[in-house]
Amino acid sequence: MDSSLDLLQSSVASLTPSLGQVLCLIVLAIGLICAVKHSQRKRFPPGPSGWPVIGSLPLLGNMPHRSLYELSKQYGPIMYLKLGTTDTVVVSSSKIAEACLKTNDLNFSIRPGSSIAKYFGYDSNDLVSAPYGPRWRMMRKVCNLHLFAGKALDDLQPVREAEVQMLVKSILEHERQEKAVPVKFGELLNVCTANILGQILLSKRVFDSQGSKASEFREMVVEGFDLAGKFIIGDFVPSLAWLDLQGVRTKMKKLHNRFDEFLTKMIKERQSASFNGGGKGDFLSMLWALRNDADGEGGKLTNDDIKGLLLTMFLAGTDTTSITVEWAMAELIRHPKMMRRCQEELDSVVKGEQRMLKESDLQNLPYLQAVVKETLRLHPSFPLLVPRMALEACEIEGYYIPKNARLIVNAWGIQRDLDVWERPLEFDPDRFVGSSVDVRGNDFQVIPFGSGRRICAGMSMGLRIVQLMLATLLHSFDLSLPDGQPPEKLDMVEAFGLTVHKAVPLLVVPASRLPLHLYN
């Protein structure tokens, strides 16, 4: 009995941990926790180390799309950076873009806050920056139904054709009065695009050549383009936003107040017209008529919703469209054989000198359509797609993406990927001739308008305007460079802002191709 008790006591004693064993277990547990945390850190995408507070912001330089593209060569097609204090994931390949914008589209369907959304989107009460949800779906539905759907686009065809003909007449007038004197091509395109949108949205030629009000609005839009392209430190380091170190937010606020005054006046005019049983049938009138119609859980349209929709359509639609046509024409001037091929195609469809081109002719111009696609590939107007944000933490290609991380898709880099495109730096429309690859968001090797739920709502309208403007100008005029400048020497350097302009604006000398009676 005693021997059995001794054996039991000995066994229990052997199971009782010594102080050294306890310490070893604690050290082992701490090491295990550190190892787990270390492995979690390693699951983040690779990327450069940043500085305190500012993170990797200095690495972006003056051309962020190019800087991020070069960094992707070192760190890979998915990178993690701290831009200021903001977790940021940068994607530079079609495969990973598809994983983000298709497979995980819902999780990346919200927008991060920004100064642009605050001051030009009426605190994110617009289609571009509004949070994904019932109100955004309601606004998207209204815009699609009355602006962007097939029938709406067809109904607005006369407006687009009329304004493009005004552009042709202004160039012809310049040719008559100042022969051999170059025109500022980009400015003319900008005026035409703004007036198309002005007529559609407000029944107003907002960039008319006469009248102080039109001139003032034009200055406001131009200033809006400039401010929207500024890099704002407070957007990436929120704790410094209140300081407004660059003074940009103050300028945005002042410009917002001027736009608000203009748009409020326009709404009051529609309110008065509606009260008196009238109306102009433009988009603003339609929005005003719908303001009290609750669309399911999306609620009613407010005045700020209406103003936010109108303002962002002007700022987003005018610049992107006109610079795409400018880049396309610059490339065609640099490649005279391609320009002649376009004009021969146009002459065969429009029957030479018998009539002016119509929008319905565009469907019969496959080479011109290929020129537009190739321009959007090589010169996307938004090289870095409008940022998105992770609603919840997720995994992409085996990497951990934290909640609220900002997603930047480098469309410019994707569309120059050597693994996808043959001779990606060359302008070659033939790569799209007979190809099923399109720019409408389903083929991730070329996504100038984005993809998924937050794809550019105005894509179809933008494509129609670009094709119509480019085709009409090529059919109506021969355009050459001034002072005998050789086409191959044309400066194609970029100037980065919110959109990518030519650093040196395109100057051209027009020469009419058609009988004068057709221009009238």
Image (cartoon, rainbow, N blue to C red):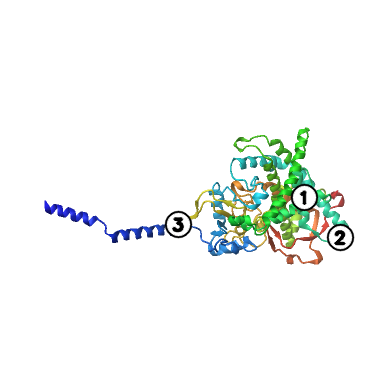
Distance in Å between CA atoms under marks 1 and 3: 52 Å
Give the x, y percent position of residue 225: 71, 54
Q: Is residue 13 left or right of residue 457?
A: left
Check contact, mark 1 vs mark 3: CB within 8 A: no
Residue occupying the point 12% across, 54% down:
3
Quick one: 332 or 280, which is closer to the camera?
Answer: 280
Residue type, numbered disc 3: Gln
Q: Which mark is residue 40?
A: 3
Which-is-in-front pick, marks 2 and 1?
1
Which of the 4 image quarters holds residue 329?
bottom right
Residue type, numbered disc 2: Lys
Residue occupying the point 55% across, 46% down:
106
Is 471 situated above or below 23?
above
| Mark before the other along the chain sequence, 1 or 3 | 3
Quick one: 179 or 31, which is closer to the camera?
Answer: 31
Q: Is residue 412 left or right of residue 222?
A: left
Residue 17 makes an appearance in the image: yes
Quick one: 132 or 372, which is closer to the camera?
Answer: 132
